Each structure stands twice: as structure tokens, then as C-alpha cells.
Amino acid sequence: MTQYEIAVIPGDGIGTEVVEAAMAVLKHCETSRGIDLNYTFHDFSADLYRRTGRRMTEADMDEIGKADAVLFGAMGLPDVRDANGLELGAQVDMRAHYGLFSSLRPVRLHAGVHSPVKADHIDMLVIRETSEGMFAGLSDFHEPSDDEASDRMTITRRTCEKLFGVAFDQARARHTRGTPGHVTLLHKSNALRSNVLMEKVFDEVAAENPDVATAKLYIDAGSMLMVTEPERFDVVVTENIFGDIVSEIAAGLVGGLGVAPSADISRERGVFQPSHGSAPDIAGKGIANPIAMILSAAMMLQWIGEKNDDGRCLSAARDIDDAVESTLASGPLARDLGGTASTQEVVDAVIGALPR
Ligand code: NAI
Ligand code: MG
């Protein structure tokens, strides 16, 4: 049996709590589906940096990157900052170091979860570009100034081609599971030169994929339509900062961050983490909703299964999705979804719904 190496980074706040929860679910699947996962733990966090000055280095990321996949909780605390005034969080560094250019963020309204909008069917995949766009200038040199500051939006043909390739592949794969199978580009080519190029490359990639229908919307109108007509979206693809924002608008439609998983991937590597952060306001209370992290762990198994053509991992991923679906439908629900369940009670329910 193939053993897969999983590098685990619990991080800060509820990151540690939801990682523990997801690992309990994974352990169950290891037995039921005959999967062999070997975990190594990497104790990096903003809290560690505050206490010791130790932070994740390039060498650490090389070491962590030897694993088959990274399971990541959340990192960052609002008051732990670098000299440049920015928060310390390894997720952006890891995306750059591993060349993770796309963040897959499935957004699905599950039975049992209340949506703030009128829609009975929401099932989309927001794909956020994560290596350039509005984050491209992060490492630019800037003279410190209290009068002026700027950031840079850069779009490259190379990344767009890869990103849109992922979007069309995902649309096709989702279609086999019953979605409409189309791709919507959210952009701002009416005002930003970088986005003119993004739209041009999108049209080219679309022409190479004539079996998949497409739509293009300006990000502002698209954001509104996401709230008023979420049913019209299947795969949604966009640049870094638009995707950061729009993926959380979309998450808000289906129960919020507590149920919003993500996978930061390239063809070779994957970091699997919930869309939420360390949630200092509820950390340490045992009430964080573990569903987003559990679904991220399922995405990890799906990705490992596809990459290694390993049906057991694919089956385990499906088991977890089904168990989450039935737990949300019947309860118990965590507090962010209007229930009263603790993290542990939700985990127990999900494990109880998994095949023996
Ligand atoms: P957050 O996602 O941590 O929390 C936003 C709100 O959602 C809070 O009210 C929180 O209680 C709630 N929430 C989030 N996850 C939840 C869960 N699983 N169950 C129940 N409620 C949940 O975002 P915030 O407060 O803006 O950031 C807190 C820290 O996390 C910051 O230092 C930020 O930089 C960091 N962060 C880290 C991320 C990462 O590691 N990828 C992503 C986003 C933020
Ligand atoms: Mg965000």
C-alpha cells in the first residue's frame, strides 16, 4: 500500500482546533478505506514568532514541500506584525515558494444550512489566482512613507494560461457530477490594462475548449449577481484580490467561513486549508466549526487520489463529503450555523456518518 506523507501545520487560534478535528476524520478513513497517511507536524505560527522570533524560512518550506500534501489550519494574529506593518502569515509565502497559482474554493449550499439570499441551489467553484494579480508587488521595495503607498497588479500570460486550463478542466470534471459545466471570468478590463490581457488570454483558452460554455462579467456587476442570482454561476475564475473578496461573498451565501474549504494547488503541489483565518474571537473555546477544515481534508484526498490514480483516496474523499452533507442536513450544527454544538460534537457526528 502506498504511504502518503502529509505535512501538518496547525498554526494559530482555531487552526489548531480544526486541524485536530480533520485528523480524527482522516484517521477513521485510513482504517475504513485502507489508506496509509504518515503525518509530520510543523509548529509554525504567529504566536511562535511572537514568543521566539522563529518564523518559517525557505529551508523550512523546502522540507515541508517534500511531503505529498500540506494540511494547513490558519496562521496569523492581528497584533503580530512584521517590520513593514504587514501581518505575519505563511500562506502567502508558501504560495510563492511552491508556485501555487490557483486556489479552488467550492461553495455549495447544503441541505440544513440557511442562506441569507433566496436561492435553493448554489453550487459553484470559485478559482482565485494566488501568485500574482494584486499581490504581485508584495516583495517590491518601497521607501517607507506616511504620505503615499501603492501596490502593483501584474497579470502574466503564462499564469493565465495555467489558471484557465485548471478552470476548464474543473468545469468538465464537475459536469460529470451533474453541474452545468461552464466557466465565468470576473474581470475589470474596462479600466485595468492588466485585465485586458487577462480577458484576451481567457478568450484564447476558451476557443481551445469549445465544449465548455463561458461568460464574462465585470467584477463589480459580477459581485452583485453573485448575491442576487447565485444559480447562474458554476466555475468562477478571477485574479488574486478579486478572488479573495468574491470567494468570501460566495461563502457568505452558503453559511459562511465555517463551511468554506480551499485547496491551493499547482500541478505538482497542494496546500489544503479552510478559507477562514485563526478566528481569535472564538479561539480556545472549543466552538469553531470544523466543517471547512474537514472538507479541505477531503479535497486533499481527492487531489492525492487523482494525482496518484488511487481509487481508495477518491472513495475516502467522497465518504467525507457525504458524511458532511448528512451531518449538515440532520445536525448537530455549530454555533456559526445557528446550532449549539461544540467542535467535538460536530466531529463525532461526521465520523458517525462515515462508512465503518
Ligand atoms: P477569520 O476568518 O479568522 O474570522 C472571521 C470571522 O468568522 C470571525 O468572527 C470568526 O469567529 C468567524 N469564523 C471563522 N472561522 C470560523 C469557524 N471555523 N467557525 C466559526 N466561526 C468562524 O478572519 P479574521 O478575523 O479577519 O482574521 C483573524 C486572523 O486570521 C488574522 O490574523 C488574519 O490575518 C488571519 N487569517 C489567516 C488566514 C489563513 O491562514 N489562510 C486567512 C484569513 C485570515
Ligand atoms: Mg480571504
Image (spheres, helix red, strand yellow):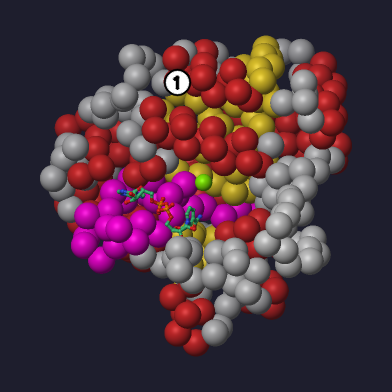
x, y (%) of residue 327?
23, 37
How many numbered dots are placed on residues in this image? 1
Q: Can you give x and y, in whole percent of width and height, for residue 170 in the image?
A: 62, 29
Residue 24 visible in this rendered orientation of the protein = no
Residue at 52%, 16% (x, y): give it.
225
Q: Which residue is at 60% across, 23% downward?
A: 220
Q: Residues within 10 Å of mark 1 (few under 14, many from 20)?
A: some
Tell me what residue is drawn at x 40 percent, y 59 percent. 278
| Side (left or right) of 104 relative to 356 | right
Of the pair 302 and 106, the residue shown nearer to us? 106
* Magenta-tinted stretch: 268-294
Answer above or below: position of 285 versus 338: below
**Mark 1: secondary structure:** helix
Residue lying at 71% horizontally and 44% vertically, measured from the top left: 134
In-front residue for pair 277/44: 277
Q: Is residue 13 visible?
A: yes
The location of residue 176, given as percent across then percent down, is 54, 20
Residue 17 forms part of the magenta stretch:
no
Is 139 placed left or right of 34 in the picture? Answer: right
Judging by the rendered image, the residue that carries numbered circle 1 is: 227
Give left or right: position of 9 versus 254.
right
